[in-house]
Image (cartoon, rainbow, N blue to C red):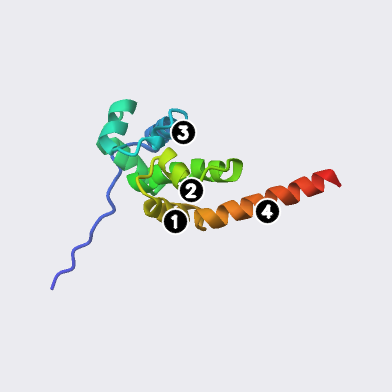
Amino acid sequence: EPRTEVAARRPILTDQRMSRTAAKLKQALQTDQLYADSTLSLRTLSDITGVTKIHISETLSQHLGINFFDFVNLHRADEAKRLLSETERNTLEIAMEVGFNSRSTFNAAFKKHVGAPPSQYRAEARSARSKGLENAVH
């Protein structure tokens, strides 16, 4: 039976174009805080950035090696890390503020991207901060 070779798919965009697109997408999520919109979709990101959905998907998969949902959740987790370590807000409040619809979705995505559940991350961040303060005093 004949074997068919599957050629690696060639990207439609050049590396340079994907780099520019990646920077634009990161800026939209970070600076414009689009991650906080729990209804953020590929279409919305496309409309806001002026980059086609195909080019966004291409850039995420070929250039950044990530899918749309993980890309968005990574930015949400980054902001959640800051809020967990700098505020006293409870986990559910933080989850909602950074764009998650439920505690369970937040916990799963946070653990995937950070490597620890939010409660453990907060405890470790507080512990590290208090050790830093002790060292600063002595």
Q: CA distance from mark 3 to mark 2?
A: 21 Å
**Which is nearer the N-term, disc 3 or disc 1?**
3
Q: Nearer the viewer, mark 3 or mark 2?
A: 2
Residue that extends furthest to the left in the rendered view of this protein: 1
Residue at numbered disc 2: 91
Q: CA distance from mark 2 to mark 4?
A: 18 Å
Badge 4 local density, few (<14 within 10 Å), some, or many (20+)? few
Quadrant of res 28: top left
Q: Secondary structure at mark 2?
A: helix
Which of the labelled discs sits on residue 30, or is there none? 3
- Are the residues at dot 1 and dot 4 in contact (C-beta closer than 8 Å)? no
Which of the labelled discs sits on residue 112, or is there none? 1
Instruction: Please state the horizontal and vertical placement of residue 5, each as a whole percent of the image.
Output: 22, 61
Q: Secondary structure at mark 4?
A: helix
Q: Looking at the image, is 98 positioned above or below residue 4?
A: above
Instruction: Please state the horizontal and vertical placement of residue 72, each as a whole percent of the image.
Output: 39, 42
Residue at numbered disc 4: 127
| Count of numbered circles on the image | 4
